[in-house]
Image (cartoon, rainbow, N blue to C red):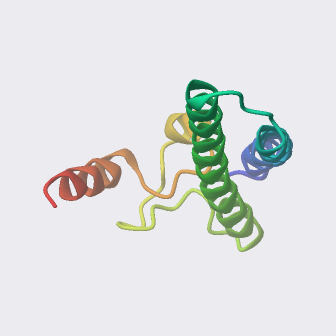
Amino acid sequence: MREHELKYFEDILKERKVQIKKNIEDSMREIEDLKDTDVGDEADHAAVSTDRLIEQAISAQQMKELGEIEFALNKIRNKTYGICEMCEEEIGFQRLKVKAHAKYCIVCREIIEKSAKSK
């Protein structure tokens, strides 16, 4: 991969990292605000509990993505970015444009998804 392409993806990953950190902070604030919410009846309590679970699920997913972004940024530093973790072939440029922190090429990703579904 060319140097300017690496820089392009590094910038995308860093921007997404900043956005995710902001999202997580906002979500944590929402969870704290929900803890302080005065619930009047069981319906209010259920609504607050549901909102809290949704915020926690979103935060967990964002934390997972943040880890994947950190992994991709490390690969850029190690000059191994854009190489599939499974077959060690180059990941297509278009795939990386869609998901800059992709670990697998399209073919290997499909294999992983199929094996996960069969379990």
Residue at the far front in the pictured view: 41
Among all residues in the image, which is located at the extreme left? 118
| Residue sitting nearer the eye, 40 or 16 | 40
Above or below for 81 versus 105: below
Where residue 30 appears, as percent x and y from the top left, is: 80, 38
Residue drawn at the location 63% of the way across and 28% of the way down:
41
- Compared to 25, does 94 lie above or below? above
Q: Residue at x 34, y 51 (%)?
A: 109
> In the image shown, does 118 or 6 lie closer to the viewer?
118
Total residue callouts:
0
Task: Left or right? Give the position of 117 relative to 69.
Answer: left
Q: Is residue 87 left or right of residue 118?
A: right
- The image shows residue 79 at horizontal and vertical percentages of 69, 69
> In percent of the image, x 58 and y 43: which residue is there?
53
Residue in front for this viewpoint, 92 or 53: 53
x 62%, y 45%: residue: 100
Q: Quadrant of the C terminus?
A: bottom left
| Residue 103 in the image, given as x and y percentages of width and height | 50, 58
Compared to residue 37, the image places residue 72 above or below, namely below
Q: Where is residue 116, by image quadrant? A: bottom left
Whole-percent x and y of residue 76? 72, 63
Please identify the residue farthest to the bottom as the structure is shown: 78
Decide: is 76 above or below 18. below
